[in-house]
Image (spheres, helix red, strand yellow):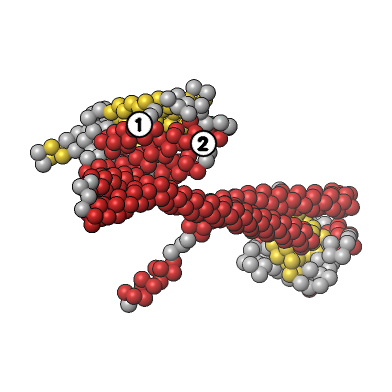
Amino acid sequence: MRNRWNSFRSRLRLTYRQKVFLLTALPLVLAVAAIAVVVTAQSRQLAEREIRELESQLIEAKRAELKNYLSLARTAIGSTYGNAAPDDDASKLLVTQTLSAMIYGQDGFFFVYDYDGNNLVSPRQTFLIGKNWSGLSDVNGVSVVDTIIETARSGGGYHAYDWAKPSTDETARMVVYVIGLQDWKWALGTGIFIDDVLSTVAAAEAETQARIQKTFIYIVLITILALFAVFVAGLLLNLHERRLADAKLRALTERIIDTQEEERGRVARELHDSISQILIGVRYTLELARKRVMGGEPRASESLDKGIDGLTEAIHEVRRISSDLRPGVLDDLGLGPALKSLIDEFSRRTGIETEFKTVVFRNLLDKDAKIALYRIAQEALTNVERHAKASHVSIEIFGHRNGATMRVEDNGTGIIGEAPRKGVGGLGLRNMQERIAQLKGTLRVISGETGTLIEASVPLTHLLSPVTTGKSAPINPRKSA
């Protein structure tokens, strides 16, 4: 079970490229999702307000239309009703006949109920006439006749309920306007079906929802395109970085090979020019000594002494070459004595005046820092010997609160060209830069007609804490270097 879990976790591990892509894409997705939610909610609220406003305007227009129809009805029966007594049956019959004849549109008509609930006029639904409909409700339980009568008693007003359309016998929403003929205790009204209004509102709602959905789809498509653009940009950037890394790796490999070949050539020249010549001389001397010994000549010991001196010189040369490759004093005594030995040997070999400045060095630099600074000094002195034409060279090394710094300065002709100011140069300078970069340090090269200054600094992390009587003591920034 644990192995399965570990296998599952290993599959879930993301590569660096996947992490960068998620880090870039996730905020974009979240932001777009938030924008989509806000835009959708606001669009829906705005659409609902607009639809309700449209519905209100349409219904208000219908109500105004009802009032106009009822005004026409009152005008038509006005003279008869106004001159009739409360019990004038003939006038009542004439009014009902007049109202029954006043139909309009496909489903428009006037209706009359007395205050007891009896239907007196219903020209399009005659089955209602002469019957008492008190307590009648629509399919939703909304009171119809009683509310109409109550509205007429109170002076008139509007009422809405579901009613069967005369033309199709389908139930639809109806708005009626009712007034009271108080002398006769009649409720006179007319109604308009507003299913066309509701259809218009429903169509507007559907259109709005379609717009909102289309907007949401557009946002999703834009998000997908943005993510695709991020992915493509990341892929191109990754390919570009990989090409750069491959190019740097090839250049570094070439530099390593060049450095190795140069070092091998130097060692080969040293062996050929010094050790080989000395050993050849020793061989001739020993052969001469052998002849003199076999011939009984008294000068045989003189030849042996020369041969011994030659071997001694060869031993010194081997030690010198070995010291150039890896000085033992660097590991035994530290960087200060190693640099002192290096610059003394440089002065002896080249005749250039040298100067070495340092404080008491307690061997507090770690191994990597010591090797890097020593090789940088060695490379700098090699450049001075080959190219600078200098008469004076100084090396200074010291510690400070940020780490340790070594300065190599000469009074030669300087490095020609723009390369030093741009931080690049020949193979030697590139080697220096790479060595100090591995330590996360800094290399500064200042060159001019009066000479060259090479300043290499390593951070405080490469300084070891000194141990005094078994306890760690704090580093003195100046003395600890």
Q: Quadrant of the C terminus?
A: top left
Picture coordinates of residue 47, whole percent (x, y): 69, 51
Residue at 32 percent of width and 35 percent of height: 345
Question: Mark 1, mark 2: which one is toward the viewer?
Answer: 1
Picture coordinates of residue 463, whole percent (x, y): 27, 39
* Residue under pointer 1: 347
Q: Nearer the viewer, residue 157 or 227?
A: 227
Examine the rendered structure and indicate whether residue 39 appears above or below residue 206: above
Residue at 88 percent of width and 60 percent of height: 104
Secondary element type, mark 1: helix
Say left or right for 38 vs 285: right
Q: Nearer the viewer, residue 201 or 352?
A: 352
Picture coordinates of residue 261, whole percent (x, y): 47, 52
Q: Nearer the viewer, residue 348 or 469?
A: 348
Mark nearer the N terminus (1 vs 2) = 1
Residue 459 appears in which quarter of the rendering? Answer: top left
Q: Is residue 476 in sight in this rendering? A: no
